[in-house]
Image (tube, rainbow, N blue to C red):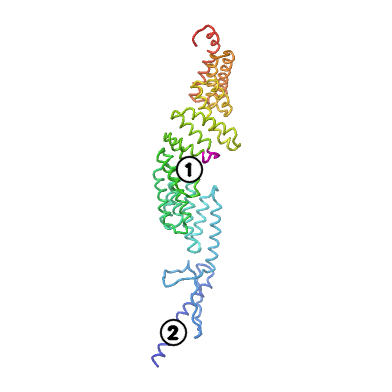
Amino acid sequence: MTMMRNDLCRVWGVACGFLALAGQLNSAEHSTSSHDSPATTPAVAPTPAASKPAKPMELPSDLTVGKSTNDNLSFKAMPEYQLRQSAEAVEKLQRVRELRGESNELFEVTKLLREILASGASKDIKTDIKRLARLQLAEIAEAKGDYENALQLLAEYIELFPTDSIVPEVLLRQGYILRKMGANDLAVSKFYLVGTAATRLPVEDLLYSQRVTLTAKAEIADTTYSQGKYKEAAKFYEVLLQDQSDELNRVVIKTKLIRALADAKDHDATIKQGLEFLEQYGASEYQAEVRYLLASAYQTSGQKQEALRELMRLLEAVEVAPENLASKWKGWKMKAGNEIGNQLYLEPDVPNAVQVYRGLVGLDTSPGWQLPLYYQIGLCSEKLALISDPEKAYAEAKKAYEEIVALAEKNEGKLSENLQFLVSMARVRLEIIPWRPSLKVAGKPN
């Protein structure tokens, strides 16, 4: 009995010792007025009632001051000081986001981030700051053209937080920056890494994983196209179109596929894909471009009538298109009309060619556009003079060449060498025209 009583006394003494330690820690926490002023008066250990068990300690999870590494403790709550510091940190984070685009953005962002890291904010908030700091500063560096620094900051992010769910997006951003730097092969390598990183994401991020992977595939195709590897790019676009995702913009991808095929000089494939596009997406805003590429493929492959048909359909589509589309299609109308006129002139179908050229002149007022058209109108009119009513035809030719001279004088010093040569030819023809009718009447060769 005496031995049992002695054991109980020892157990009770140990229990009282632990409770005294808990009381001192709690008292020190609540009496602290600042993070560098520890409690001056230790609390007296309370005497516990024998019938009530001791409550578990409720201490902060991140004691910024006086914290020592100890895996025996698992703190549960956060002190008032740290709550206040964390709230201030959140406000500064919001200010960081509002600073985007301001002239002093880099200075202010750096200042705010340093203040948060030096504060008593919670460990989680500081970790988030370390993440945000690299992303935010990388974005600022990229905007200022400091691409190497931006790449370094993003690389540090991946190294420090390799399991973060946004790592695939960080890799995407690295790819974009490398492409801006002209390092297209390295950019493509980064885009391939996006798919690898996305496979490591948890199941609940499946949709995000699919989206970022599709984005990377599209960027690989676009970057390959920008390198002039048209056949390879076309294959990438074809693979993209095989994906069943309803988030793919199939109209855009199909258009890019047709561009790649046209640039690769694969005329048969261009015609096939172009006809499929017009059948599936005939009302698309890309209709004019596809019709032009289709007509060019027909023309190059020797199918001149089919080419002319598509060009005429393009002009008709522009005429009936809504104003917003008509303005977008103006460039394609100009290209198509010019090619139709040139084709008619060479056939030769001069009466129709001159009508086409006259209809095109007013589409653009720049000398680079109008001078060649006026010259073609002059040549066509001279040819018409050999068919009927030479006096009227030569008068129209003379008028066209005079328009060229007048435009040249109005834009003196602004014309390219090619346009200056064209102007000199127009002046020569103006000197010849007065002799044309008499030459024809005398039966002399033209």
- Circle 2 residue: 13
> Mark 1: which amino acid?
Ile
Image quarter in which the N terminus is found = bottom left
- Horizontal and vertical percent position of residue 107: 51, 51
Give residue 253's mark.
1
**Corner quadrant of residue 366:** top right
Residue at the farthest top position: 442
Query: Which element is circle 1 on?
Result: helix
Q: Is residue 233 left or right of residue 309?
A: left
Magenta stretch: includes residue 301: no
- Front-most of 230 and 127? 230
Q: Which residues are magenta?
A: 279-286
Query: Which element is circle 2 on?
Result: helix
Q: Earlier in the sequence, mark 2 or mark 1?
A: 2
Give residue 197's mark.
none
What secondary structure characterizes most of the magenta part? Answer: loop
CA distance for labels 2 and 1: 78 Å
